[in-house]
Amino acid sequence: MSIAEPILLTPGPLTTSARTRQAMMVDWGSWDDRFNQLTASLCEQLLAIINGADSHHCIPLQGSGTFAVEAAIGTLVPRDGKILVLINGAYGKRLAKICEVLGRPFSTFETAEDEPTTAADVDRLLHADAGITHVALIHCETSTGILNPLPDIAQVVARHGKRLIIDAMSSFGALPVDAQQVPFDALIAASGKCLEGVPGMGFVFARKDSLAQSAGHSHSLAMDLFDQHSYMAKTGQWRFTPPTHVVAALHEALLQYNEEGGLPARHERYAANCQALMEAMSNLGLRSFLPAAIQAPIIATFHAPTDPRYQFKEFYERVKAKGYILYPGKLTQVETFRVGCIGHVQPADMRLAVAAIGEVLREMEVLEI
């Protein structure tokens, strides 16, 4: 790739294939039968990834992943419900903020940014507060790359007779979740992450019976998933102007996803990317924030060099000039930066990116390198 087309080592938007970009070169009519068939095919393929066709509906929604998270909470949690929000990073905090803005009663349980929430924590919290109706969890917390133990937590929530909402924005398509084994009311993801589409569309897998009971819950016309699904089921069309080019790109990205070998192959490539990244960064003397046991192969956080000559903005611009886009840290206590392992990239790309990082740190005369 040229410098004008850098490799994005971010958690999304991310590097896409030429085929995916080419799919956006066609204009679609939003009422066109072929476009409606594209949407239906998309939802069918997405449901297959979680083995959810029998139990869940796939409801696409215009906007970023956060739009879909807000829509899921606003639609599936009744106004007198109460949500336990599990937090160990910025996106858990955002979820709590959504609850606050929507006026949904909620409580939070926060652990350190390098400490997963445990099933035992959730069991204790649900025993202590019978008023909780829903639990909201970030599967892979994008602010660090930490992986929370979703299957164990899901079983505890189900045992208490509560409902689970999963923000799987950074994990869906790469980390396995079987809807028949992991009970949940909603799992939320987006087009521009591990499926390697482009940003602009979220989607919610909503349990069929829960969605059927959700009429009138939503705070918003545009974000009412009950209405969105009802209209789409009746007409085959989106209620409001759909992101046609995003849908076409994601449909093409899913064809490539299946050609590659589906979720197992996508996970294997991302894991190889992560391993190559970790080994090469370690050779430079840069330390990862998380221990390997809780590091998801999605995005990795690294401690910034302590040398005063290191400044992230200059570091970022210099690495960008060599053809790679990194991501700033999102931690409050320590200075970090992040490197994504996802997108249309291979382990060789990760090693070349780290070589560029090493060159930049030498040019900046950072002492640790």
Image (cartoon, grey):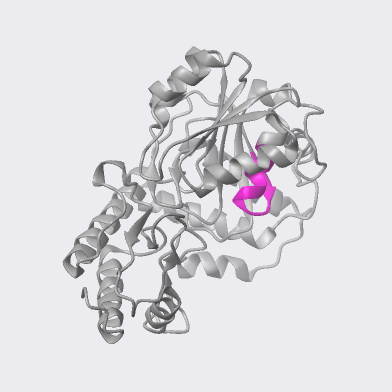
Q: Residue at x 53, y 57 (%)?
A: 192
Q: Nearer the viewer, residue 254 or 352?
A: 352
Looking at the image, residue 352 sits to the left or right of residue 242; the answer is: left
Q: Nearer the viewer, residue 64 or 238?
A: 64
Which residue does the image show at 36% across and 64% down from the upper left? Answer: 345
Splitting the image into 4 quarters, where does residue 17 fall?
bottom left
**Nearest the camera: 281 or 216?**
281
- Total numbered badges shown on the rendered structure: 0
Residue 140 sits inside the magenta stretch? no
Q: Which quarter of the rendering shows the N terminus?
A: bottom left
Name of the residue lying farthest toward the bottom: 363
Figure check: 207 above or below 131: below
Residue 70 appears at what percent x and percent y?
67, 42
Residue beneath the point at 41% across and 69% down: 326
User: Could you say which quadrant of the image residue 353 lies in?
Assistant: bottom left
Q: Position of residue 215 (x, y in %)?
A: 79, 27
State whether residue 120 appears in this view: yes
Q: Quadrant of the C terminus?
A: bottom left
Q: What's drawn in magenta, residue-wise?
A: 59-72
Q: Is residue 133 above or below residue 69?
A: above
Q: Which residue is found at the position 67% from the left and 35% from the top? A: 73
Observer able to see residue 41: no
User: x and y percent of residue 199 in the render?
Assistant: 58, 59
For the residue pair 181 and 154, the one nearer the viewer reads as 154
